[in-house]
Image: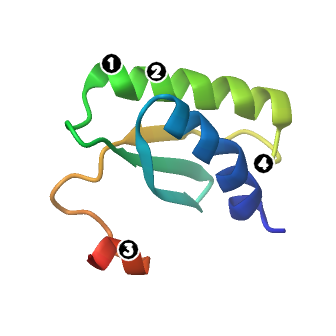
Amino acid sequence: MDTTSRTRELIVPLVEAAGADLYDLEYTGGTLRVTITHQDGVDVELITKVTRSISHALDEEDPIAGQYPLEVSSPGLERNLRRPEHFQ
């Protein structure tokens, strides 16, 4: 299993526990980008909650070797469309 898949397995339950959905997960250029959605929109409070939860789990499980920045955000208007569900 590759790094992104292992990280996705770790992150999905944490995002869902916060009441959000994982829109996308990307690990490129040494940066882990987690994009979340919520039916009522994503606010700073939700991003903070998810960021803390993910950061703690990544520190515990260490699925990615070395240091890397973690970015958690909403998809925004210029969202990437990579998976079939993104096109729906």
81 displayed left or right of 5: left
Q: Which residue is mark 3?
A: 85
Query: Could you tell me which secondary element the residue under label 2 belongs to?
Result: helix
Label number found at residue 15: none
**First reached walking from the N terminus: tag 4 or tag 1:** 1
Disc on the earlier residue, 4 or 3: 4
Q: Is residue 85 above or below residue 35?
A: below
Q: Amino acid at mark 1?
A: Glu
Give the Cα separation between the discs numbered 4 and 2: 21 Å
**Cα–Cα span, label 4 and label 1:** 26 Å
Q: Earlier in the sequence, mark 3 or mark 2?
A: 2
Name the spot of residue 47 as percent of width and height, x first: 38, 28
Residue ID at (29%, 23%): 44
In the foreground, 34 or 68: 34
Residue behind mark 4 = 64
Label located before the other in sequence (4 or 2): 2
The CA span between labels 4 and 3 is 26 Å
Secondary structure of the residue carrying tag 4 is loop
Q: Amino acid at mark 3?
A: Glu
The numbered mark at residue 45 is 1
At label 4, the amino acid type is Ile
- Marks 1 and 3, Cα distance to the nearest angstrom? 26 Å
Whether label 2 touches label 1, CB < 8 Å = yes
